[in-house]
Amino acid sequence: MKGELNTFEQDAKVGIFQNETCIAPNDANFDFHEKVKFKLFLNKNCKNLHITSKEEKEKNIDIPLKENYTNQYDKYIEIFKLNERYKVHKDIVFKMIQNAELYPESRLRELQDLTGIPFQQIKKDIFNLIDENEDLSKQPFSKLIKDISKELQLI
């Protein structure tokens, strides 16, 4: 596919986009990782993040990429089918939601007292959290995990 689609012009195969100019990924102003975030949407049946089964997960969780303030990255999301690709990774978000239910802050403090392991380390290990300064390209699904962690107020 490399070189087949021109991301800088409107392409009838892809659809019509409001913003026809895109920033090249090697441009200094390319800030996709800052402006585009995964958002967690739960069906209204999921009160207090309570999802009991993996089957429920499929119909009750949605994790689309959403851009704040502009739509300059919509074309990238569409061309590379990012939302479609990440829909199959709802299990990562499901696990994070389950862990958020199983390990409230009081339980994490209790584990700290029992083990002597620092609170932040326990939280990082249980929720597979990524440090703020860590390079997102070094760990699989790091953007998804980081964005959803913020949505769940884990970081």
Image (cartoon, grey):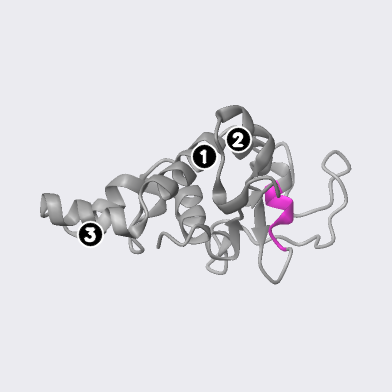
The span picked out in magenta is 72-77
Q: Nearer the viewer, residue 68 or 102?
A: 102
The residue at which mark 3 appears reads as: 119
Residues tagged 2 and 3 counted as in contact (Cβ below 8 A): no
Local crowd size for mark 3, using a 10 Å CA cut-off: few (<14), some (14–19), many (≥20):
some
The x and y percentages for residue 20 are 81, 60
* 31 over 146 or under it: above or below: below
Q: Amino acid at mark 1?
A: Phe
Element type where label 1 sits in the image:
helix
Q: CA distance from mark 2 to mark 3?
A: 29 Å
**Residue at (55, 49) in percent of width and height:** 49
Q: For this view, does 140 lie left or right of residue 49?
A: left
Q: Nearer the viewer, residue 100 or 11?
A: 100
The answer to whether residue 75 is magenta is: yes
Q: CA distance from mark 3 to mark 1?
A: 23 Å
Q: For this view, does 10 lie left or right of residue 53?
A: right
Find residue 78 and name its label: none
Residue 86 shows in the view: yes
Counting residues from the start of the chain, the first of labels 1 and 2 encountered is: 2
Counting residues from the start of the chain, the first of labels 2 and 3 encountered is: 2
Main SS of the magenta part reads: helix
Quarter containing the N terminus? top right
Residues tagged 1 and 2 counted as in contact (Cβ below 8 A): yes
Q: Amino acid at mark 2?
A: Lys
The residue at which mark 1 appears reads as: 94
Q: CA distance from mark 1 to mark 2?
A: 7 Å
* 155 over 87 or under it: above or below: below
Q: For this view, does 14 lie left or right of residue 36?
A: right
Local crowd size for mark 1, using a 10 Å CA cut-off: few (<14), some (14–19), many (≥20):
many
The residue at which mark 2 appears reads as: 57
**Residue at (56, 53) in percent of width and height:** 48
